[in-house]
Image (cartoon, rainbow, N blue to C red):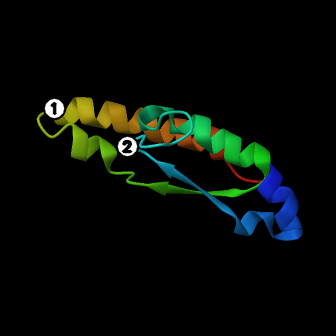
Amino acid sequence: AEVAAVAGSRACDVYMGVDVHGRGTFGGGKTACDVALLAARMSGVSAAIFAPGWVHENFPDTSEEVREDISETFWRRVVEAWGPRP
């Protein structure tokens, strides 16, 4: 929020990076990336998602059906958290 206030009318030009692997990411990453996205949105800044292919990279020996379920959960939560800006 402080960075957004300093940026003023250019707050949407400030990006909060979200690492899907969860390395140092607020909220822990993985299927909980929506936590960080909600924080960015509430602060009025933009967000950039790093490694959205996390599911396929971390579950190579898992069935395609399970990977699809995890991926659908991830993207549903991203859409629910971010949605269109007013």
Residue 8 appears in which quarter of the rendering?
Answer: bottom right
User: Are the residues at dot 1 and dot 2 in contact (C-beta closer than 8 Å)?
Assistant: no
**What residue is at 71 percent from the left and 52 percent from the top?**
84
Helix, strand or loop at disc 2? loop
Q: Where is residue 47 in the image (x, y as percent from the top left)?
A: 61, 56
Image side of residue 38 versus residue 20, left or right? right
Q: Report the residue marked by disc 1.
A: 62
**What residue is at 79 percent from the left and 64 percent from the top?**
11
Camera-side residue of 30 and 75? 30
Q: Report the residue marked by disc 2.
A: 21
Q: Is residue 60 in sight in this rendering?
A: yes
Nearer the observer, disc 1 or disc 2?
2
User: Label 2 neighbourhood size at 10 Å, few (<14), some (14-19), many (20+)?
Assistant: many
Q: Distance between the residues labelled 1 and 2?
A: 17 Å
Up the image or down, 31 lies above or below 44; here it is above
Say which amino acid is labelled 2.
Answer: His
Q: Residue furthest left?
A: 61
Residue 71 appears in which quarter of the rendering?
Answer: top left
Q: Is residue 86 in sight in this rendering?
A: no
Q: Where is residue 13 in the image (x, y as percent from the top left)?
A: 72, 69
**What residue is at 41 percent from the left and 43 percent from the top?**
23
Say which amino acid is labelled 1.
Answer: Thr
**What residue is at 87 percent from the left and 57 percent from the top?**
5
Labels 1 and 2: the sequence-earlier one? 2
Image side of residue 68 versus residue 26, left or right? left
Up the image or down, 82 lies above or below 47; here it is above
Camera-side residue of 72 and 54? 54
Question: How many numbered marks, from 0 up?
Answer: 2
Residue 59 appears in which quarter of the rendering?
Answer: top left
Helix, strand or loop at disc 1? loop
